[in-house]
Image (spheres, rainbow, N blue to C red):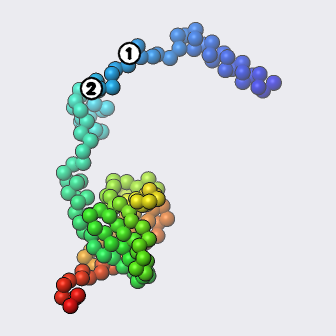
Amino acid sequence: MKLNLKLLAGCTAAIALAACGGPETVDETPAADDPIESEGSLTEDPEIGLDEEPGGDMDMTMSDTNMDAANETLAALEGDWVSGDDNLSKMSILDGTVTMMYDGEVLSTETLQTVDSCPDAPGDTSDMQLITMTGAESNETLCYGIIALTEAELQLTSYPRGNTLTYIRMPAVTESDME
């Protein structure tokens, strides 16, 4: 009997849609290369929402201030780091690429990026610099909050686990060290 009631309800809904004219449809689909026309801002208050003029194009680029901060963070992260918990665990960061090593063996190569948010982060991270590392082979992305970043030390919190990873910057090898 339950199945008949569900079927009856479905038929009734279909008849009601047909009698009322159904949902509105678009008469004509614009060509793929036609420009997209905007009907205005998503909000009447220009201080809220997107940086968009009514009828204008949205600006999807990072602001110069945000891009400068991201570049500064990436530059400050560059170098060779050894884990504070296990001196056999090391990572090298150069030009946005992270190479993870253990006991001299390369474990993974990852792409490093600064981001605005970590979806798995519990709580507010608005006051924290955030980075992601995406595995070149696994394509898995892990998100981290930077707790501390100095010339000598890097502390990260891993999301969603929340554990703290501490790294000590290794001294740069110079030509005089090689002699």
Q: Quadrant of residue 176?
A: bottom left
Q: Is residue 153 left or right of residue 118?
A: left
Q: Is residue 140 visible?
A: yes
Q: Quadrant of the C terminus?
A: bottom left
Q: CA distance from mark 1 to mark 2?
A: 15 Å
- Furthest toward the top, the residue is 19
- Furthest toward the right, the residue is 1
Residue corresponding to mark 2? 35
- Furthest toward the front, the residue is 179
Query: Where is 9 relative to 128, above or below?
Result: above
* Amino acid residing under circle 2: Pro
Q: Is residue 23 left or right of residue 73?
A: right
Residue corresponding to mark 1? 28
Label 1 or label 2, whichever comes before in sequence order: 1
| Image spot of residue 141 (x, y percent) | 43, 57
Element assignment for label 2: loop
In this orientation, which residue lies closer to the viewer: 11 or 90?
A: 90
